Image (cartoon, helix red, strand yellow):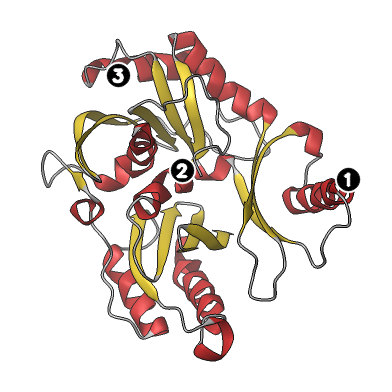
Amino acid sequence: MPNLLSRIVDPRYPATAIGLEKGVASVVHLERIKGATCKLRRAATFNIAESLVRPGFDETNIEQPSQLVGVLNELAASAGLLKQKRWSMSLPEATTRTLVLILESPAQSAAELQDVLKWKVERGFGAPIEELSISRERLQKDSQGRDRYLVIAVRKSVLAEYESVLEALGWRAGLILPRHLGEAQWLVRNGSTGDSLLLSGSSQGFTGVIFRDKHPLIVRTVTCTEDEFEDEFYRLLLFYRDRTTPEGAGGHTLARLMVIGEGITKQRAGEIVNETTGGDLRPLEAEDLGLQLPSRDFSFDSIAAPAGLATLSW
């Protein structure tokens, strides 16, 4: 899915990327070693004032652009990446919205398809389509043979805020994606038999994505408190389980689990998955996904999204 919300400046994507989330900013530069294995050549993470980036779909995200420009300049300098001009960027999770749209019946023409998708997009995102920057990808049909589309949206005005910060630094955006799709690259690029689950948590809830054959099967973004996190995660897993029984969808099972971010510990997330699906999974670590970190003290969670985007450079 490398084309989603992309701003392509070259056929090749940059190996440098920025990650922004409420209270955290990261930069990375990846180097490919062999095959799917890579290492952090340079990286830095700063805890930043939460007022610098206020993620949200419907409101201003960056009220003081000049302050964020200064922080990113200092961050790149600390990582030795000031000379880099081409960057990808992972946007905060709450800044974007993602839906899987299902067409109940086949469209009779291209014009009808566009009209149906426009209606579903505006209803799903709660905004006029003219105000949105949208990326759409056709997915595999569901078990009933219905057409499905993965649709990602960000308000044009909000996207422009982030692009203006890059422009002020003299940087060009090679690719801009939501946080969970940056993280998901680690599962997509390291495909295996069976389904894969990404649980990407934040202080505002989580996004859960289940992949089958490298394609999103289920995408669910949930806004909830930390106390509600486990119950909502259970609901997602039950929804998946009920549709993947031998009688339902071919007896598929979860083969891999990736847990990133806040809201729940990796251990607890693994326990819930195994209790619900009857599996014996443990959350994957950086080394399981082909990334060599400089030390055990370096947090994979803090750089998983931008590092995932950087893997698209090869």
Residue 77 occupies which quadrant of the picture? top left
Left or right for 183, reference 289: right
Badge 3: how crowded within 10 Å, few (<14), some, or many (20+)? Answer: many
Give the amino acid at mark 1.
Answer: Ala
Mark 3 vs mark 1: in front: 1
Pick out the residue farthest to the left. 295
Residue that carries the numbered disc 2 in the rendered image: 179
Report x, y in % for residue 203.
45, 51
Residue that carries the numbered disc 1 in the rendered image: 111
Residue 56 occupies which quadrant of the picture? top right
Residue 53 in view: no
Q: Earlier in the sequence, mark 2 or mark 1?
A: 1
Q: CA distance from mark 3 to mark 1?
A: 46 Å
Give the amino acid at mark 2.
Answer: Arg
Residue that carries the numbered disc 3 in the rendered image: 76
Report x, y in % for residue 254.
39, 74
Q: CA distance from mark 2 to mark 1?
A: 32 Å
Residue 287 in view: yes
Dots 2, 3 in contact, CB < 8 A: no
Report x, y in % for residue 257.
34, 65
Residue located 25% across and 46% down the image: 36
Residue located 33% across and 44% down the image: 304
Report x, y in % for residue 210.
48, 64
Q: Secondary structure at mark 3?
A: helix
Badge 2: how crowded within 10 Å, few (<14), some, or many (20+)? Answer: many
